[in-house]
Image: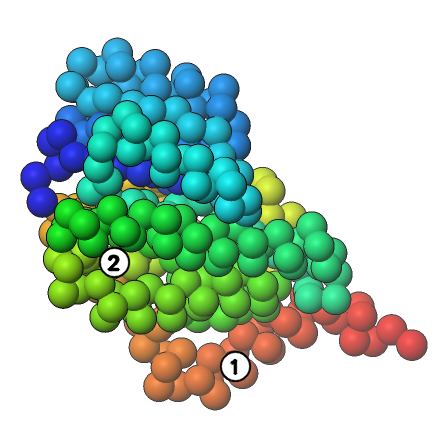
Amino acid sequence: MNIKGKVAIVTGASSGIGEATAREFAKEGARIVLAARRVEKLQELAGEIAAMNSGAETLVVQADLSKLEDIQAMIRQTLERFNRIDVLVNNAGFGRLDWLENLDPVKDIQAQIDVNVMGVIQTTRQVLPEMIKQHSGSIINMCSMAGLVGTPTYSIYAASKHAVHGFSEALRREVKPWGIEVSLIYPGGVVTEFAQHAGIKRKTNAKTPAFMLLTAEQVGQAVVKLARNPKRMLVIPWLWNMTVFMNKFLPGLVDYTTIHRFTIPEREDELHAK
């Protein structure tokens, strides 16, 4: 796909990966729909893109992806402005990371499923008729390593990303005859606001090694490459494929290592409490 002039919707565009992805599309001269809840951030980004003089156009849409009416309004405004949709980047999402019994049933559990799963499904559902009509399109779903490997405290986030994985795999096989590509991207740790909002607590100080950390810009560049040259799955950085391999073929070893090096040390006080 030649990105210049194409219409790309980027959800969760107010910060992090979404913001970086929008900038990368702008560099290619795309017409970009910037969608998120924080409209002030979107307007700032739209102004910066306009100042780039790259020929990129933007449409700012305030949208809460847990609400179907907001999704429908976003698609309606996109079609009214640009009359087509070429790329959908389902990036909006968040995590609340804690032991399952500590998660709030509504604010943490239900909200993650509403945004991370239902938001992706409903947005795709609204876009799909237009792409079928065009006989072309690219749908790129932002997954996570949590969509391939479940780890402690990530139970609901991992469940949501595994759901996106299954949804995308089935969808890819549904829509390919219409020239529509469906791609999944699985970043490892990324330097964004995610950790600030996730409520991460670590006694062991376990975290992604610095040499494995990605910038939001690197992920954004990878997304644009997927739009240009679609792939079914892209794990970044590549080294995470080793973890995926071990989780698939040596699950007992992964279980033992994770439980004894993370779960037990993290919960030691609770385990020994009377």
Q: Is residue 85 left or right of residue 178?
A: right
Task: Tell me the mark number nearer the camera, choosing from 1 and 2.
Answer: 2
Q: Secondary structure at mark 1?
A: helix
Quadrant (top left/top right/bottom left/bottom right) for the C terminus: bottom right
Label number found at residue 125: none
Residue 162 image point, x, y percent = 44, 68
User: In front: 57, or 154?
Assistant: 57
At 8% from the left and 39% from the top, the residue drawn is 2
At 24% from the left and 21% from the top, the residue drawn is 57
- Compared to residue 271, the image places residue 23 above or below, namely above
User: In front: 26, or 125?
Assistant: 125
- Circle 1 Cα neighbour tier, 10 Å, few/some/many (<14 / 14–19 / ≥20): few
Q: Secondary structure at mark 2?
A: strand
Mark 2 lies on residue: 183
Q: Earlier in the sequence, mark 1 or mark 2?
A: 2
Tell me which corner region of the image, top left, top right, bottom left or bottom right, holds residue 235: bottom left
Tell me which corner region of the image, top left, top right, bottom left or bottom right, holds residue 141: bottom left
Q: Are marks 1 and 2 in contact (CB under 8 Å)?
A: no
Q: Is residue 232 visible?
A: yes
As drawn, which residue projects farthest toward the left?
2
Residue 158 image point, x, y percent = 51, 65
- Circle 2 Cα neighbour tier, 10 Å, few/some/many (<14 / 14–19 / ≥20): many
Mark 1 lies on residue: 255
Q: Is residue 200 visible?
A: no
Residue 8 image point, x, y percent = 25, 37
Question: How is the model colour-coded?
Answer: rainbow
Query: Which amino acid, mark 1?
Result: Asp
Quadrant (top left/top right/bottom left/bottom right) for the N terminus: top left
Q: Is residue 208 left or right of residue 2?
A: right
- Compared to residue 84, the image places residue 95 above or below, namely below
Mark count: 2
Q: CA distance from mark 1 to mark 2?
A: 29 Å
